[in-house]
Image (spheres, rainbow, N blue to C red):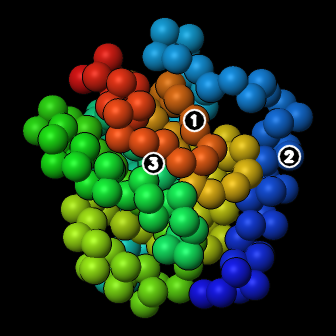
Amino acid sequence: MTLRGAAPYLAVLALVGLGYLAQRSLTPSTPDAGPLVRLDALWSAHLPDLEGRPQALEQWRGKVLVLNFWAPWCPPCRREIPGFIALQKQYAAQGVQFVGVALDDPERVREFAQEHGINYPILLGGDAAMRLAQDAGSAGGLPYSVVFNRRGESVNAITGEIVGKRLETLLKPLL
């Protein structure tokens, strides 16, 4: 997908972000500040995986969930993925689950995931992913990550690239 082909996705994220900004502060919460978003609508969401099978977010309830909206054509998304791979490997046994929601052509996403050895589930975007981003409180733009505690509450929302060490600092209190 070219940058021109990504324009509809970015436009929707921008609109979602404007609505989000009108309702809340830009400052992400800390684990002690309480939830940013309730997952009621998110837990019932289904998105296709790389094989086209619908996957429910419900299957990851009870884990520390990092939900990352990204695209292969997005440079900051590409830079943060190696850190996600390492953290998934390091903390999977402690109940951490990364889930990527890719906003691009399924074949391109599949190739990228294989080439980079992504070791966590990748779901495919589209209109349902845009609604999911809105439910997750997207502030617009990619990458966009939301960290949920085991109770299903969002405790951090990050627009833009997040490096592994910062994310690890956010995850540790939730383990």
Query: SS at mark 2?
Result: helix
In the depicted structure, whether residue 139 falls above or below residue 34: below
In the depicted structure, whether residue 20 falls above or below residue 27: below
Whether residues under marks 1 and 3 lie with C-beta atoms below 8 angstroms apart, the answer is: no
Query: Percent position (x, y) of residue 147?
Result: 45, 35
Q: Is residue 65 visible?
A: no
Query: SS at mark 1?
Result: strand
Query: SS at mark 3?
Result: strand
Whether residues under marks 3 and 2 lie with C-beta atoms below 8 angstroms apart, the answer is: no
Query: Percent position (x, y) of residue 36?
Result: 61, 26
Q: Is residue 163 visible?
A: yes
The span from disc 1 to disc 3 (Cα, nearest Å) is 9 Å
Relative to 170, is 82 on the left or the right? left
The span from disc 1 to disc 2 (Cα, nearest Å) is 15 Å
Q: Which of the marked residues, 3 or 2, is nearer the chain's N terminus?
A: 2
Q: Which of the marked residues, 1 or 3, is nearer the chain's N terminus?
A: 3
Residue at which label 3 appears: 67
Most distant residue in the left direction: 93
Relative to 139, is 82 on the left or the right? left
Question: Which label was assigned to residue 18?
Answer: 2
Query: Percent position (x, y) of residue 72?
Result: 49, 74
- Which residue: 48% across, 52% down? 68
Q: How many marks?
A: 3
Q: Which of the marked residues, 1 or 2, is nearer the chain's N terminus?
A: 2
Residue at which label 1 appears: 157
* Residue type highlighted by circle 3: Leu
